[in-house]
Image (cartoon, helix red, strand yellow):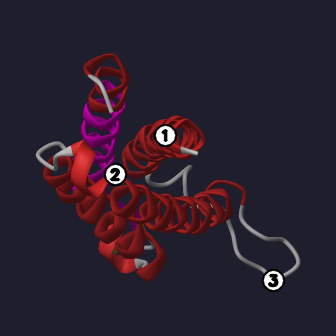
Amino acid sequence: MNKTQWIPIVCLRVIAMVSTFVATLLMVTSHDSAKVLGMTFQAKYNNSSTLKYFVVVSIITTVYSLGALFVPPRKLGRHVLVLDMIIMSFLISSFSAAVGIGQLGKEGNSHAGWIPICGQVPKFCHHVTASLIAGFVAVIIYFLLVLYSLNNVLNLVAFKA
């Protein structure tokens, strides 16, 4: 893989790393409290296992993206592509689960009797929303990264044949 093929991959990795880091930072700092009937309730990301999963996957993706920047592309290109696909799968699953919980917190579920909480804890909801937007950027960037890397690997195989 020559330098012109490697530069877009590095740029995409850096953008993905920054977006997952921002998503993690925003989610970890999301907390708010509300007073209802004289009782104080706190909303934090670690109250939900789904949001914890999103944070863990975002941290893993950030660390992996940083580490993948230092891998020589000629030697381990195919292995990195497989790992990129695995990371992208985890990102998609954690993002989807977190969006589901975010929607439930925002809209509630009248059939189950769950009321929306964003009216009581808006700061928490804004942080979670911003974190999910950064997570969505990471999903899109990783999708582009996998497509570009797959194209490079397939072109390399076709070139050798």
Residue labelled with disc 1: 156
* Residue at x-position 88% and y-position 78%: 111
Mark 2 and mark 1: Cα distance apart in space: 10 Å
Q: Are marks 2 and 1 in contact (CB under 8 Å)?
A: yes
**Is 5 on the left or on the right of 161, as rendered?**
left
Q: Within 10 Å of the Cα at label 1, are there few (<14), some (14-19), or many (20+) other Cα atoms? A: few
Q: Are marks 3 and 2 in contact (CB under 8 Å)?
A: no
- Secondary structure under tag 3 reads loop
Amino acid at dot 2: Gly
Q: First in sequence: mark 2 or mark 1?
A: 2
How far across and down, in percent of the image, does residue 73 sit? 25, 44
* Residue at x-position 72% and y-position 56%: 107
**Is 12 on the left or on the right of 114, as rendered?**
left
Amino acid at dot 1: Leu
Amino acid at dot 3: Ala
Residue labelled with disc 2: 77
Residue labelled with disc 3: 112
Mark 3 and mark 1: Cα distance apart in space: 54 Å
- Secondary structure under tag 2 reads helix
Of all residues, the one furthest to the right in this rendering is 111
- Secondary structure under tag 1 reads helix
Look at the image and say whether residue 113 sits in the magenta stretch: no
**Is 115 on the left or on the right of 129, as rendered?**
right
The segment highlighted magenta reads 11-35
Mark 3 and mark 2: Cα distance apart in space: 48 Å
